[in-house]
Amino acid sequence: MAPIPIVFDTDPGVDDALALMLALASPELDVMGVCTVNGNVSLDICTRNALGLLQLLERNDVPVYRGADQPLVREPVYATEVHGKEGMGAAVLPVSHVAAKENAAAFLVEQLTQRPEEVTVIAVGPLTNLALAEKIMPGVLAKAKRVVAMGGAVVAPGNASATAEFNFYADPHAAQDVIRSGAKLTLVPLDATQQVGLAEAVIREKIVPLDTPMAKFVVDAVANVLAYGEQLGRDTVVYLHDPLAVGVAIAPSMFDCLQFSLDVETVGDLTMGQLVSDRRQAPVGGRLGHTVNCVMGVQADRFLNLFLERTLNLQAE
Ligand code: RIB
Ligand code: CA
């Protein structure tokens, strides 16, 4: 079967880097380009990280397009406490010999209009670039074969606030625009992504002993995430939020989906960025929101083994 052409939209970020590693190591996908967006860290740092990771992976054939340097409306928020000041934990990426291109939104429009119903967009950061593409050409997101977006929390608590997941919290207006766009959207919310994690013991016992450049990068990159979790007294695990979105595209049989009527709250001190699902039984006047396919279940061990095998050539026992 011919590989699926994808555009990878990202705010690298540690789990973004793991997701890009998985995408580039998967023969099911053909990465046409990487679009960077302001999110975990600033656009400049996200773009430098995307270029540096492609340099490390010897994949400078994949173009990087700089995207939005701020959310559509709200003030920017970052996640440096999780990903580190430079967005890659304790990992140091090589300096790329390649310059990024400009205008990620225009690249998205170009890819989706030149190859209607063929290109899958995998979005693992705030959805600003996708929303801007839709503003440039209303209806363009619906030309994608599908949009797979990591974001939101259907019934799970938020992680950026009590009610909101980070990607939706960082740009709630963009998330709302994408959900309302009519795109063939599969959402990968925290309800699913928090079922799959790299445990500290697996990192220590399986990844560290590999002693390869990529294993060292992963160990160094996740160090900050683990330290932050430990500092808060949480489980010492690195949730594979963004890699799961790639997994949906390469191994759909590992995932279970449900449809919900969804919209996104864009105001409110307590609720900005909240994904609202109307789960009422036959409400008068119909349910609010738009019907969206949500990944709610994952075969966690199968996916983790696939991830480790593809990114680090680590065979499951
Ligand atoms: O909530 C998890 C998401 O926010 C992931 O995409 C992570 O990289 C951060 O951007
Ligand atoms: Ca991300």
Image: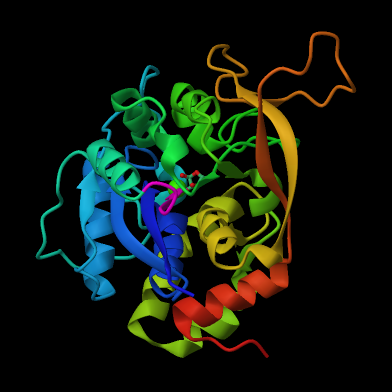
Kindly give the residue lying farthest to the right in the view shown: 281
**Residue 41 picture location, percent across and down:** 34, 42
Classify residue 182 as left or right of residue 256: left
**Which residue appears at 40% of the width and 18% of the height?**
74
Q: Quadrant of residue 112?
A: top left
**Which residue appears at 32% of the width and 40% of the height?**
37
Instruction: From the viewer's side, name the closer residue of 205 and 55.
Output: 55
Question: Is residue 122 one of those drawn in magenta?
Answer: yes
Instruction: From the viewer's side, name the closer residue of 246 and 57.
Output: 246
Q: Is residue 234 visible?
A: no
**Residue 119 picture location, percent across and down:** 40, 53
Classify residue 147 as left or right of residue 237: left
Task: Tell me where the magenta segment starts and ends, as one range.
Answer: 116-123
Q: Quadrant of residue 73?
A: top left
Question: Does 274 appear above or below 213?
Answer: above
**Residue 107 picture location, percent across and down:** 24, 44
Question: Is residue 30 one of those drawn in magenta?
Answer: no
Q: Is residue 105 visible?
A: yes
Question: Does 184 appear above or below 247?
Answer: above
**Which residue appears at 69% of the width and 66% of the height?**
253
Classify residue 193 as left or right of residue 113: right
